Image (spheres, coloured by chain):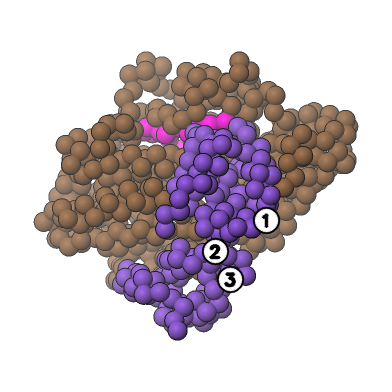
Amino acid sequence: MRSEVSRTEFKPVLLGRVGKPDSQTLATYRADGGYEGLAKALKMTNTEVIDVVKNSGLRGRGGAGFPTGLKWTFLPKDINGPVYLCVNGDESEPGTFNNRVLIEEDPHQILEGIVISSFATRTTTAYFYLRYEYGRCYRVLKKAIDEMYANNLLGKNILGSGYDLDIYLHRGACAYICGEETGLIESLEGKRAWPRIKPPFPAIEGAFRRPTVVNNVETMACIPHILKNGPEWFQSMGIPKDPNNPRDAGSYGPKLYCVSGHVNKPGLVELPMGVTARELIDKHAGGVWKGRTAKAVIPGGLSMGFMTNAELDTPLDFNGPGRVGCLGLGTAAVVVIDDQTSMVDVLYNSCRFYAHESCGQCTPCREGTAWSTKILERIRQGKGKLSDIDLLLEIANSIGVMPGTTICGLADGAAWPIKTAIAKYRGEFEAYIKSGRKSESAALAHAH
Amino acid sequence: MSELSENAKQTIAEHLPRYPNKQAVTLPALHVVQQEKGCVSNKAMKEIAEILELSPAQILDTATFYGFFRTEENPLGQKRIWVCRSISCMLRGGEELLAALCEKYGISPGETTPDGKLTLELAECLGACDGAPCVLVEDELHLRCSVEDVERLANEPVQK
């Protein structure tokens, strides 16, 4: 385990330039050592770059935590014709806003990562899929990409290396499902964003039926630093591999934690992977607001489910949240729920979100998310039955990739809040139903 | 007369070389048309389909999958304001904000004021949870909004 000392010595990496004057411009980025990682990469072979990223232990920051370098090696060895890199900027997991801040404040850091990753994967066209709601991000990126073309960092023969690359921005249209990598690909292709059955995985057959890599924005932002400072530097941060578990890939590097909800100072915090939720809330987010205590905390975006106050000393690395029954680290978006909030209302909000965002392709997800919402609606109207609790659990246990009934993981994300809320706060649900009380926010009928 | 403006046609043409097939220009085409007209009419969908060598049904299929695009029966007002209701905003008053705005303007989410000036929408997580409750005006996020803030934003002159 890492020591407390090195965490206090930690200097932000990904947010290192945030708040500096004109942090979005190429000139300031270069003055701070920007594009040195790219210059270094372009002098290597593409497989050497992949090895550096592989050796760093970098795992994808979008939610699933798949090792990035390994993902790149799944591309076929002998490729004739184009390979595509899709950057997943469809950040929509409730509680998550790190990509937005990274793009708005330091776009070149991400773009440098994209050029390096494209070079490593022999991509000559990269698509940056950006959710529509991030209009400011779109304008910032557009300007930054124009600067790159004007300075031989994109286009033909980048920095005299003989390598060519184009990056195109592609705006989404307000659909959560586009964050699922094959949903994103379908959307990019101009279709409804229905996730594809896998295999084939995108590395074999992705965008436009060509080998494709889909990577998250924060993952891209890590790449230039890894190239510049080396894999050992990246591995000096975070939680090392568990020597007793051969399948553990470790949790290395800096991580952006989005803290929101009932805290005094909501915001983005960068720390070495593995800070506990309690430390994050108390030391970095000003504590729970109004002098209250936390009843529940979402460790990594709504889909991960809930941790109780007693579980807050869990380290937020790739393995921690799973040890307390959550789905995983997810996007490391920590949402704090205070002791005055009803878990029935929270779970209703969660179920409604997934019902709204289910793409409708798989029946268990489409129906399960809708019915769980209706059951909670009934409970909130004071008409719930105690048997509704087990009915909710039955739904949660039968939708998703894990029970094997859906194509993508959206339904697992819908199920985990239900499973963890009922496992950990069952008494509150029972008391609510027995009291026959109506939710105060049920009065806000047309807000639903 | 063509339903698509010269600007829309030009935008579509500019996007074509970026993708290996024409269908990929569907979303950019829908975006530019809705931006200009406040909806994507049936005639516009037909014309987009012609340019992209698709059937109009394929354009309709994509357009209606995304809650974002409006058909000609249900056009947008001059300004579109989205209020986030997902978990972080809900915890800090997002639902109350949306309810107050619905009451103030006398419309439900998705509807437009009778004078055609404002369309109010409910949004799922807008990615600005550090500034909950947040709203989106067209494509610009506004953090930590009160009812008064949104009224002020609604009254600002429209820039299109």
Circle count: 3
**Residue A250, position in %: x, y?**
43, 35
Going by the numbered disc 1, the residue's amino acid type is: Cys
Q: Please name the residue that numbered disc 3 is placed on.
A: B72
> Is residue B33 something that shows in the picture?
yes
Which chain is indicated by disc 3?
A: B
Query: Are the two marked residues, 1 and 3, in contact with CB atoms closer than 8 angstroms?
Result: no
Residue span colored magenta: A247-261
Q: Position of residue A18 (x, y in %)?
A: 32, 33
Q: Position of residue A245 (x, y in %)?
A: 49, 35
Q: Secondary structure at mark 3?
A: loop
Extreme front residue here? B115
- Residue A404 visible in the shown view: no
Pick out the residue farthest to the left. Answer: A160
Tell me the residue at 44%/81% (across/down).
B2
Amino acid, disc 3: Glu
Q: Quadrant of residue A390?
A: top right
Magenta stretch: residue A258 in it?
yes
Which hue is chain A drawn in? brown
Identify the residue under disc 2: B69
The chain coloured purple is B
Kindly identify the amino acid type of the residue bearing the numbered disc 2.
Answer: Phe
User: Callout 1: helix, strand or loop?
Assistant: helix
The residue pinned by badge 1 equals: A365
Q: Nearer the viewer, residue A35 or B109?
A: B109
Mark 2 and mark 1 on one chain: no
* SS at badge 2: loop
